[in-house]
Image (tube, rainbow, N blue to C red):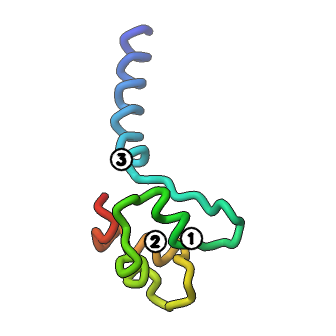
Amino acid sequence: MTTKAITFAALLGLAAGPLLAQTMVEDTDGSGGYSIEELTAAYPDLTAEGFAEIDADGDGEVSEDELAAARDAGLLGE
């Protein structure tokens, strides 16, 4: 039983690794999107120009979809 539990825990840890590696961004003002301040809290190297590139629709906030596209494109250094 102990060997099974250890094996299960090890596999669970391997599976969770990529999920834990992704930087978490918080919507601190509850707006439903991410401001430049919220993104730079998670990504300190993000510039205003980088934010503008990620904010594809130019509304001043980055949506979940825009954030996912930026991560997929490697724009956030993850």
Tag 3: Cα neighbours inside 10 Å, few (<14), some, or many (≥20)?
few
For image coordinates 56% across by 72% down, the residue present is: 35
Residue with the mark numbered 3:
18
For image coordinates 42% across by 8% down, the residue present is: 2
Q: What element carries label 3?
A: helix
Residue with the mark numbered 2:
67
**Marks 1 and 2: which is nearer the front?**
1
Q: Judge by depth and name the residue closer to the eye, 41 or 16.
A: 41
Q: Judge by depth and name the residue closer to the eye, 70 or 6.
A: 70
Of label 3 and label 2, which has the lower sequence position?
A: 3
For image coordinates 56% across by 89% down, the residue present is: 59
**Marks 3 and 2: which is nearer the front?**
2
- Circles 1 and 2 in contact, beta carbons < 8 Å: yes
Callout 2 amino acid: Leu
Callout 1 amino acid: Tyr
Tag 2: Cα neighbours inside 10 Å, few (<14), some, or many (≥20)?
many
- Mark on residue 69? none
Query: Left or right: where does residue 65 sit relative to residue 7?
Result: right
Where does the N terminus fall, quadrant-wise?
A: top left
For image coordinates 28% across by 68% down, the residue present is: 74
What is the CA distance from the residue labelled 1 to the residue labelled 2? Answer: 9 Å
Residue with the mark numbered 1:
34
What is the CA distance from the residue labelled 3 to the residue labelled 2? Answer: 17 Å
